[in-house]
Image: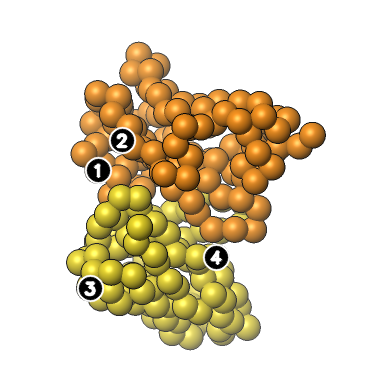
Chain colours: A orange, B yellow
Amino acid sequence: QVQLVQSGAEVKKPGASVRVSCKASGYTFTSYGISWVRQAPGQGLEWMGWITPYNGHTNYTQQLQGRVTMTTDTSTRTAYVELSGLRLDDAAVYFCARVGSGYPNYFDSWGQGTLVTVSS
Amino acid sequence: DIQMTQSPSSLSASVGDRVTITCQASQDINIYLNWYQQKPGKAPKLLIYDTSNLETGVPSRFSGSGSGTDFTFTISSLQSEDIATYYCQQYHNLPPAFGQGTQVEIK
């Protein structure tokens, strides 16, 4: 079955960077995209961006442009999101989700989430 | 960017009740609308895609309808395990956008 397993919780200081991983199994990794979605405490879902493992194409939300980088390693079937210049309001649970390869249509499988705490 | 507005933001209903949630898009999104269920401390789960298609394994008491800018999500007979927050999501345009969520509780 499709499974996305994310890395563990992180605690970072403001201004630092964080990288979260998402290891995929149960499907052909290069036939689908990976989107990243975050959820601040008690808040709704915020789309961060999308990467196509087949060719590395990315599309990021305007709000995070310049601070977010999404990559994949097809040899290990792992996707990564890195967020730099962390601010207090970046504290959230970060989810990876499988989406269509050509377009982030529906998010049909999700990782378990990674809690990122930003605190001085 | 397209904005998605859900209503109500929360509701309380009895087991067996029919529950309806609406989602309005700020512009025409055709049928490119999905619904998710999120239980506390868990990742969201896709329930319905393309407005009205039930994801595999999802109980038939869940349904969706609509097109253009106005959409409806229905639970025909609320069960205790349906306690969750429900989100709509459009993918007509980038960026994909979620509604603010509707929290469903048991009365």
Residue B69 x/y as whole percent: 28, 74
* Mark 3 crowd level (few <14, some 14–19, many ≥20, 10 Å Cα): some
The reply to the same-chain question for discs 4 and 3 is yes
* Distance Cα–Cα, label 4 vs label 3: 25 Å
* Mark 4 crowd level (few <14, some 14–19, many ≥20, 10 Å Cα): some
* Distance Cα–Cα, label 3 vs label 2: 26 Å
Q: Are marks 1 and 2 in contact (CB under 8 Å)?
A: yes
Q: Is residue A20 left or right of residue B72?
A: right
Q: Is residue B10 visible?
A: yes
Q: Which residue is mark 3?
A: B67
Q: Give the chain letter at badge 3.
A: B
Q: Give the chain letter at badge 1.
A: A
Tag in front: 2 or 4: 2
The kind of residue on which mark 2 rests is: Gly
Q: Which residue is mark 2?
A: A33
Q: Which residue is mark 4?
A: B84
Q: In the picture shown, does residue A85 fall above or below B31?
A: above
* Distance Cα–Cα, label 1 vs label 2: 8 Å
Q: Give the chain letter at badge 2.
A: A
Q: Which residue is mark 1?
A: A103
Q: Are marks 2 and 4 in contact (CB under 8 Å)?
A: no
